Image (spheres, rainbow, N blue to C red):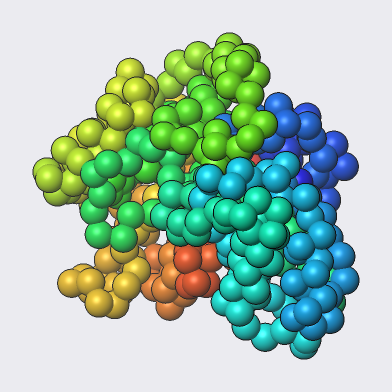
Amino acid sequence: MVAKTLFGFEEILARELRDLGAQDVKVGNRVVSFYGDTGFMYKANLCLRTAVRILKPITSGKVRNEKELYDFIQSIVWKEYLDVNDTFAIYATVNSTLFNHSQFIALKTKDAIVDKFRDETGNRPSVDLDYPDLTINIHIQQDVCTVSLDSSGGSLHHRGYRTATNVAPINEVLAAGLLLLSGWNGQCDFMDPMCGSGTMAIEAAMIACNIPPNLNRKEFAFEKWLDWDMDLYEKIEEVCLKKTRDFRYSIIGMDKEGATVRKANKNVENANLSDFITIKEGDFFESNKELEGSLHMVFNPPYDERLEINIEEFYSKIGDTLKKSYPGTNAWFITGNLEALKHVGLRPSRKIKVFNGKLEAKLVKYEMYAGSKRTKFQK
């Protein structure tokens, strides 16, 4: 199988897969391939935090023109995967000098499938791009065509808990990946001082408690497959839930807008995590570290020039607040405005290249010591 992910998260996803029990894990560009059975496919969709979707390849072959593509698609025994009364959708990606239009590939594939059913049964399945019973993925790399079934359906960042959002909420898979890149493991207090719709705090709580991230999701594509095994899925879900763990620290989200705080609290409630997360109204720049001991902070500050903030002043305030008010804190944040980092006034101890959508960004770490840095190293 193949798990798709975001740029920079490939190694984290590979580690997640190995921890779940995947075999022969291999890292690619924004993808990780692995082996597992049907039950593992269910578990991967339920439990992987940094996967966007899970594809199950069913065959591959050489195609050099549209006739060879049509014949190749017709050679597949489609009745093993699709009933004549079912609906289907096709998505194609092409990286080839022989083919240059993914929409054309999708259309040709659709024709081959429909013609095969019509020849064999006199009837044909219908296309439904919104709620198909089967989603087929066609990938052409030069002259090699791989046909896969999409076991996830909608992107796995649609966790199911976020019903209330604000402007440009952070993608859930991106949030989980940033947390894992930061080394968050639930062994201290956590804070998101600019929490927006609460996504970072929710993902942090699920990591800390080892709760499957897609537990609240409405459905997966594999639930409509002809070989769907509900008993097996429920058994896997039950086993995964038994592996959740206690969390004895605090997770705090803060935002200065009351309406935003209410939305975040609604999402926390949807995720059934109100026992672990406190969302409160407050301005980070006027706040102080309230908890004793180590604090792990991950946040997503605004970095778009179109927003009504002075970027230079805003990032300078981030640095001042961390320095004066948050000793004993490992503070991480993501920004797509690399110029803004120059105004923080602190030297980051780590910089990791990531992408927020198509925008290149940096995840940066600032280590705020309790006392001077010199004292820290003398201990």
State which quarter of the image contains the C terminus.
top right
258 lies left or right of 340: left
Q: Is residue 215 above or below residue 78?
A: above
Task: Give me the residue at 44% from left, 70% from top.
Answer: 336
Q: Is residue 294 above or below residue 312?
A: above
343 lies left or right of 258: right
Residue 81 or residue 331, whichever sits in front: 81
Residue 94 or residue 170, whichever sits in front: 94
Task: Give me the residue at 61% from left, 37% from top.
Answer: 225
What percent of the width, then of the height, locates residue 271? 36, 29
Task: Give me the residue at 59% from left, 73% from top.
Answer: 107
Q: Is residue 32 above or below residue 341?
A: above
What percent of the width, then of the height, locates residue 47? 59, 32
Count the marks: 0
253 lies left or right of 213: left
Give the quadrant of residue 265.
top left
* Most distant residue in the left direction: 258
What percent of the width, then of the height, locates residue 9? 64, 54
Give the quadrant of residue 143.
bottom right
Residue 290 or residue 279, whichever sits in front: 279
Looking at the image, can residue 138 be seen?
A: yes
Q: Is residue 249 above or below residue 83?
A: above
Looking at the image, can residue 54 be seen?
A: no
What percent of the width, then of the height, locates residue 313? 26, 70
271 lies left or right of 310: right
Task: Give me the residue at 79% from left, 35% from top.
Answer: 36
